[in-house]
């Protein structure tokens, strides 16, 4: 467990660098996590994907893997990788402040 | 902003993360193709660079007319747990493929042609083997448009430089030494167990 300062507050991260407590998440924290991931500006398309990932986690207890993320957001796989070059499901989950998604597809 | 410890996976004692994989598909059976596709797709999902190299019967996965008809091997496949003679009966392979397909569909695992498109969209490189293409008398036009190129083994090694090479197989094999990993049959951890669950 490590800590980091995002959005002006100190937050705890798990071993994978995901927010340890999804409850402390704010949009300001999200923007700073995105910057740390190399995404300097979150566009509407980024937010669409991040919100879908977070909504699914809050509803079901687990975040979506790439295929599901694409289907649920309506953003195609190609665009997902363009938006989140480091891996859409992982990066979106990090920015959304939710645990690492565990799906294989 | 900033973290108070070293970034992920960069500690002195942490093993170096895998940054690139080149996966060889040589079998044209369902269990020969899917593990490779899942591994390539999964690599990209983790931000790992991935290349797929289709050779010999593995080329069926990217062959226009054939990639919708890839079937489970029911003969010479002890993991099927049916006698070989029974597995050889007409329709057995289609039946096993049908049942496995239903399970995969329920788990949202796409059919091969759709999976290939998805993997190409992740930015992975898909290549066919020059020697196999010549041997089977195929041309560029026989392949799905997601195939970037037909390349020689030398070009494959050049492309794989600096990464891991993974040889996926539809048959049981022991592990090979060095960086060459051998991936066993997928159904051992998937189809059968899931069906019982």
Image: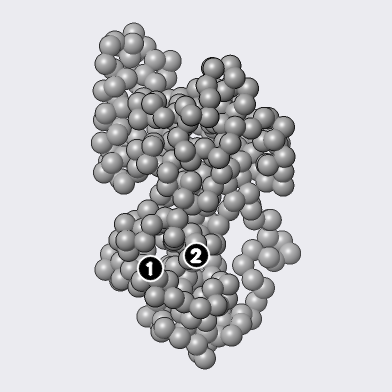
**Closer-to-camera residue (A55/B66):** B66
Q: Specify few, some or many for label 1: CA neighbours under 10 Å numbering under 14, 14-19, or 20 or more.
A: many
Q: Specify few, some or many for label 2: CA neighbours under 10 Å numbering under 14, 14-19, or 20 or more.
A: many
Quadrant (top left, top right, bottom left, bottom right) of the N terminus of chain A: bottom right
**Closer-to-camera residue (A25/B48):** B48
| Residue that lies at the very extreme toward the bottom in this rendered image | A8
Sequence-first tag of 1 and 2: 1
Chain letter behind tag 2: A
Labels 1 & 2 near each other (Cβ < 8 A): yes
Q: Residue at x 68, y 30 (%)?
A: B153
Give x and y (percent) for residue B122.
49, 52
Evaluate whether label 1 is on the same chain as label 2.
yes
Identify residue for label 2. Answer: A84
In the image, residue B181 sits, relative to residue A46, either above or below, namely above
Q: CA distance from mark 1 to mark 2?
A: 10 Å
**Closer-to-camera residue (B181/B83):** B181
Give the quarter of the image for residue B137. Answer: top right
Q: Residue at x 46, y 50 (%)?
A: B121
Give the quarter of the image for residue B73. Answer: top left
Chain letter behind tag 1: A
Identify residue for label 1. Answer: A49
Q: Is residue B178 visible?
A: yes
In the image, residue B33 sits, relative to residue A82, either above or below, namely above
**Closer-to-camera residue (B142/A46):** B142
* Label of residue B120 in the image: none
In the image, residue B132 sits, relative to residue B101, either above or below, namely above
| Residue that lies at the very extreme toward the top in this rendered image | B85
In the image, residue B50 sits, relative to residue B150, either above or below, namely below
Q: Secondary structure at mark 1?
A: helix
């Amino acid at each position: 467990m490590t800590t980091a300062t995002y959005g002006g507050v100190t937050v705890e991260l798990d071993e994978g660098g995901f927010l340890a407590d999804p409850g402390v998440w704010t949009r300001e924290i999200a923007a700073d996590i995105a910057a740390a991931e190399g995404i300097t500006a979150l566009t509407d398309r980024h937010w669409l994907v991040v919100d879908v990932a977070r909504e699914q986690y809050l509803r079901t207890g687990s975040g979506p893997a790439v295929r599901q993320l694409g289907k649920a957001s309506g953003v195609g796989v190609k665009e997902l990788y363009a938006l989140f070059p480091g891996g859409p499901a992982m990066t979106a989950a990090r920015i959304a402040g939710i645990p690492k998604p565990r799906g294989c597809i | 902003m900033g973290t108070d410890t070293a970034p992920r996976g960069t500690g002195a004692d942490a093993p170096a993360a895998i940054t690139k994989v080149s996966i060889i598909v040589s079998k044209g059976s369902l269990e020969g193709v899917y593990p490779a596709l899942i591994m390539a797709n999964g690599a990209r999902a983790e931000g790992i660079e991935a290349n797929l190299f289709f050779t010999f019967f593995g080329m069926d996965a990217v062959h226009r007319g054939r990639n919708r008809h890839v079937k489970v091997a029911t003969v010479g496949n002890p993991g099927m747990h049916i006698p070989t003679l029974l597995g050889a009966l007409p329709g057995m392979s289609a039946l096993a493929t049908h049942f496995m397909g239903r399970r995969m569909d329920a788990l949202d695992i796409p059919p091969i042609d759709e999976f290939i498109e998805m993997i190409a969209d992740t930015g992975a490189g898909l290549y066919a083997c020059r020697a196999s293409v010549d041997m089977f008398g195929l041309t560029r036009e026989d392949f799905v448009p997601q195939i970037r190129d037909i390349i020689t083994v030398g070009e494959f090694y050049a492309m794989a430089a600096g990464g891991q090479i993974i040889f996926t197989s539809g048959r049981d094999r022991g592990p090979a030494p060095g960086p060459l990993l051998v991936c066993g049959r997928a159904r051992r951890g998937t189809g059968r167990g899931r069906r019982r669950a």
